Image (cartoon, rainbow, N blue to C red):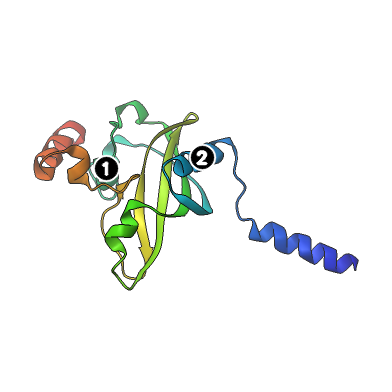
Amino acid sequence: MKKLVILFVVLFLSACGPRLDEDAQLAKEYLKEQGYSVKSYEGRFSHIIEREQLIHKPDIFVWAVQTVEPDAYIGKEITQERFIVKHHPLSKIYGPQKSFSYKVSVSVFMFEGEIIGGISFPVGNGIAGSPYSLDGKTAEEVINGDYAEWNKQWNEKYGD
């Protein structure tokens, strides 16, 4: 009986996945407030924003779908709380594709306990491309203009 209880506890704990700390819980609640159904927590990923990386892929694509400029975060650590969600706007766009799982991967960007942005991407076999904003908008929709012009100005500002 004791072995059975230990096995149950091990299986239960391993099925729970990564634990949510205060930032992850805040991000999860934010996603729920946006109307998304949170299916799983995929963990935390951190990185330091480096100016020289802002003009290279994938960073330039990530920042093209943000509503904040990276200046305040250069040289600082940003954390990404990653989740799999359903009922995201991308579900409507990708729904007709057979390879789409009706799930969307979202990364909520956090800095010092505050949500500053994020990205979303449809989950499925063979789906590739640039990330969308946290709420499923393209770069053109977020910048509200011509991407080529935005890209030129971005490179002038953050390039050598």
Q: In which quarter of the image is residue 153?
A: top left
Left or right: 83 as drawn, with respect to 65: right
For label 2, the SS is: helix
User: Can residue 116 be seen in the rendering of this structure?
Assistant: yes
Q: Name the amino acid, label 2.
A: Glu
Q: In which quarter of the image is residue 144?
A: top left
Q: Mark 2 points at which residue?
A: 29
**The N terminus: image quadrant:** bottom right
User: Can residue 54 be seen in the rendering of this structure?
Assistant: no
Q: Residue at x 23, y 48 (%)?
A: 138
Residue 65 numbered mark, or none: 1
Q: Distance between the residues labelled 1 and 2?
A: 21 Å
Residue sitting at the far top: 72
Residue 123 numbered mark, or none: none
Q: Name the amino acid, label 1.
A: Val
Q: Which residue is drawn at 47% across and 52% down?
A: 37
**The C terminus: image quadrant:** top left
The correct choice, above or below, for 15 with respect to 78 in the image is: below
Say few, some or many: other residues with alpha carbon within 10 Å of mark 1 (under 14 / 14 to 19 / 20 or more).
Answer: many
Q: Position of residue 15 (x, y in %)?
A: 65, 60
Q: Do the residues labelled 1 and 2 touch (CB within 8 Å)?
A: no
Left or right: 49 as drawn, with respect to 29: left
